[in-house]
Amino acid sequence: MFGDIGWAELMIIGVVALIVIGPKDLPEMFRQLGRVMAKVRAMGRDFSRAMEQAAKDSGVSDVAKDMRAATSPTAMGLDKVRAAADKFEKWDPLKPTKPAAKPLTPPPMPPATPVAAAVADAAVPEPEAAAEPEPAAKPAPKPKAVRAKAAPAETTGEAAAKTPAKTPRKKAEPK
């Protein structure tokens, strides 16, 4: 109520009231003013409570709460839009971008402890000494494919098989 009035203004009003009303009636006037202000505040509180109760009974508070929830920027996703717009406004095309993140690599394996080594040794049975295994026979080499070529009449059988077929070569094209 007296938000715009400072201490200096209140002193001036008090001095003027002291002169106009007089020193005898001034305390009684302030008492009456206090009682009137208390009654006005009480009436304001009663009015406020009555309005809140009427709103609660009619369901207006639920509707107001639903409207606030429905129109909130967070519920509509406008906070994300605002954040993206801010990011776009702050973007400088001449500023270099951050380097790409390092690729993820698994952490190195810890060195084997004596306990882990003992467990690993116990899990793997030791091979018994056995006679040396016999060497496996080498498979026979596959015969090379020989292109059939019109052989002269006297070449037959073994001589034809030993003679490798020649493939014609392409002549180099001039550049």
Image: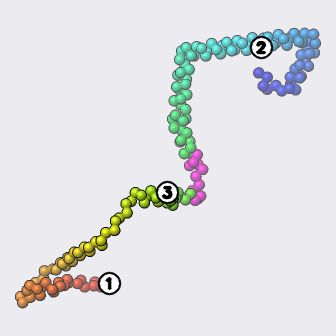
The residue closer to the viewer here, 121 or 136, is 121
Instruction: Let me know if residue 154 appears in the view.
Output: yes
The scheme the figure's colours follow is rainbow
Residue 92 vs 155, above or below: the answer is above
Mark closer to the observer (3, 2): 3
SS label for mark 3:
helix
The residue lying at 55 percent from left, 32 percent from top is 72
The residue lying at 93 percent from left, 10 percent from top is 24
What is the number of the mark on residue 120?
none
Q: Residue 130 at what x, y percent from top left?
A: 31, 69
Q: Amino acid at mark 2?
A: Met
The residue closer to the viewer here, 18 or 157, is 157
Specify start and end residues of the magenta stretch as a single range: 86-96
Q: Is residue 143 left or right of residue 151?
A: right
Residue 140: say if magenta.
no
Q: Residues within 10 Å of mark 3 (few under 14, many from 20)?
A: few
Q: Which quadrant of the structure image shows residue 158?
A: bottom left
Q: Residue 148 at what x, y percent from top left?
A: 13, 80
Mark closer to the observer (1, 2): 2
SS label for mark 1:
loop
Q: Amino acid at mark 3?
A: Val
Residue 37 vs 117, above or below: the answer is above
Q: Amino acid at mark 1?
A: Lys
The residue lying at 89 percent from left, 23 percent from top is 11
Residue 91: say if magenta.
yes
Instruction: Let me know if residue 152 appears in the view.
Output: no
Residue ID for mark 1: 175
Residue ID for mark 2: 37
Q: Please report whichever mark, 1 or 3, sits nearer to the chain's N-terminal start.
A: 3
